[in-house]
Image (cartoon, rainbow, N blue to C red):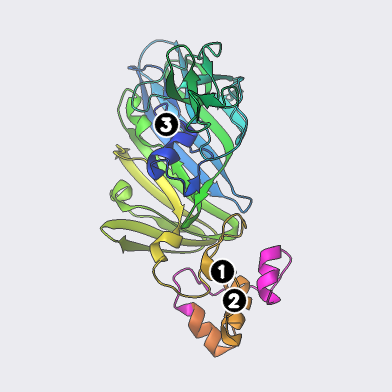
């Protein structure tokens, strides 16, 4: 789970950095790599990071680490900062518990560890120390609605009433780890709400660079799994981060290709009940990962019936039924939920139409079982 923890950058802050705090999206939280407060003896030997994209708008993170202590037995404070939500109305938690993180667990050397929470200052590239803020001095958006007659910028900041200054804050999750000489294992999990915005149904930012804070300044053996279990997902990641090797479909049905969008190159992936895997040795991440739904890559295609995410949180315009749609357009949209699941159309026109989309993966074994269709999908099918 070390990858889940950013260099003490908040889970939510990553999205803030990516979206430049624009008002076209909601940032709930982002994943981070587990980091030590300070470390010179312990090397990150192996990491297996699994990110599962779910249909309820959440991502499940599971990380397994092997760390090698090259010195004597020692204790290290480690954890991550989960940045405060942005453009969201979640109440401030003085206890340091993030409103959109759940099921946080840490098992070290087969022993479950307890963890602590705190409200801390987020300083981005400055090494974190998990030092709790004095909340008698720093006030939340909920406590100070107005400042000098103006509203506070947003609820992801704290205000010092004495110095009239603002800071970004985060919710810290941290624990004390006792490292024996030689190899140690940590298994770390948590669940969090993915962000979304204009042009993206879901966004899963995840900090990889904090791995450089361990003694070897790399991950000797790194494996990334991205899963879409019992669902379909269409997303992309930045090619530059993963140029060292290639993604491979290791389970289920999937497609992978390189896609250029303006001046940037991405790895575009379509999955249905499957897993893609990336593996590298001596991995030294120079940037952080962002798994983002693929609408933005095809925003200018203007084709009716593009892929949509079944979470029903935010839907592209080409999913929505309009009053001026023709009978043929309505027929295309009515069959979109079936195409999403890989239905092989007997109607040649429909089969030809949907075959133009990268995300469409015919599945002759799917027998049009509609038990998991959402209310919005039924609205399309029923033409309203």
How far across and down, in percent of the image, does residue 135 sit?
Answer: 55, 14
Of callouts 3 and 1, which one flags the residue occurring earlier in the amino acid sequence?
Answer: 3
Q: Is residue 114 magenta?
A: no
How far across and down, in percent of the image, does residue 227 sit?
Answer: 53, 52
Q: Is residue 36 above or below residue 329?
A: above
Residue at 70% from the left image edge and 70% from the top image edge:
378
Write the start and end of the magenta stretch as one range: 355-384
**Label 3 Cα neighbours within 10 Å, binned few <14 / some 14-19 / many ≥20:** many
Instruction: Return the residue at label 1.
Output: 319
Inter-mark Cα distance, 2 to 3: 41 Å
In this view, the residue farthest toward the left is 263
In-image side of 218 versus 37 (left or right):
left
- For the residues labelled 2 and 3, say whether their Cβ atoms are less than 8 Å apart: no
Please give the label number shown on residue 6: 3
Could you say whether the residue bearing mark 3 is in a helix, strand or loop? loop
Please give the label number shown on residue 21: none
Q: Can residue 51 be seen by looking at this rendering?
A: yes
Residue at 57% from the left image edge and 74% from the top image edge:
339
In this view, the residue farthest toward the bottom is 348
In-image side of 150 versus 102 (left or right):
left
Mark 3 or mark 1, whichever is nearer to me: 1
Residue at 59% from the left image edge and 51% from the top image edge:
54
**Label 2 Cα neighbours within 10 Å, binned few <14 / some 14-19 / many ≥20:** many
How far across and down, in percent of the image, does residue 68 sit?
Answer: 39, 23
- For the residues labelled 1 and 2, say whether their Cβ atoms are less than 8 Å apart: yes
Instruction: Return the residue at label 2.
Output: 333
Q: Is residue 313 above or below residue 69?
A: below
């Amino acid at each position: 789970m070390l990858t889940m923890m950013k260099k003490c950058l908040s889970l939510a802050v990553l999205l803030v950095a990516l979206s430049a705090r624009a008002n076209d999206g909601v940032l709930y939280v982002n994943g981070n790599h587990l980091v030590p407060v300070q470390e010179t003896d312990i090397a990150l030997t192996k990491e297996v990071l699994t990110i599962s994209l779910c249909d309820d708008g959440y991502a499940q993170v599971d990380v397994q680490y092997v760390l090698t202590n090259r010195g004597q037995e020692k204790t290290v404070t480690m954890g991550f900062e989960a940045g405060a939500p942005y453009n969201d109305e979640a109440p401030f938690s003085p206890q340091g518990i993030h409103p959109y993180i759940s099921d946080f667990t840490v098992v070290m050397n087969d022993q479950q560890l307890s963890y602590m929470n705190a409200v801390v200052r987020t300083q981005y590239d400055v090494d974190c120390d998990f030092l709790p803020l004095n909340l008698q001095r720093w006030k939340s958006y909920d406590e100070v609605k107005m400042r000098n007659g103006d509203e506070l910028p947003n609820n992801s900041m704290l205000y010092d009433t004495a110095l009239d200054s603002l800071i970004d804050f985060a919710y810290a999750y941290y624990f004390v780890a006792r490292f024996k000489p030689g190899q140690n294992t940590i298994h770390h999990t948590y669940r969090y709400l993915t962000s979304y915005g204009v042009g993206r149904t879901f966004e899963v930012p995840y900090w990889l660079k904090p791995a450089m804070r361990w003694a070897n300044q790399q991950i000797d053996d790194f494996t990334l799994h991205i899963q879409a279990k019992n669902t379909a997902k269409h997303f992309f990641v930045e090619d530059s981060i993963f140029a060292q090797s290639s993604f491979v479909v290791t389970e289920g049905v999937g497609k992978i290709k390189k896609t250029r969008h303006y001046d940037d190159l991405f790895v575009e992936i379509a999955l249905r009940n499957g897993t893609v895997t990336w593996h590298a040795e001596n991995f030294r991440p120079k940037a952080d990962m962002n798994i983002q739904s693929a609408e933005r890559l095809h925003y200018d295609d203007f084709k009716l019936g593009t892929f949509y995410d079944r979470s029903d949180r935010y839907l592209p315009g080409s999913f929505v039924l309009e009053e001026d749609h023709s009978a043929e357009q309505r027929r295309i949209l009515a069959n979109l939920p079936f195409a999403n699941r890989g239905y092989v159309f007997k109607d040649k026109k429909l089969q030809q139409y949907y075959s133009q989309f990268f995300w469409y993966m015919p599945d002759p074994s799917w027998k049009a079982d509609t038990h998991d269709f959402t209310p919005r999908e039924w609205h399309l099918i029923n033409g309203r």
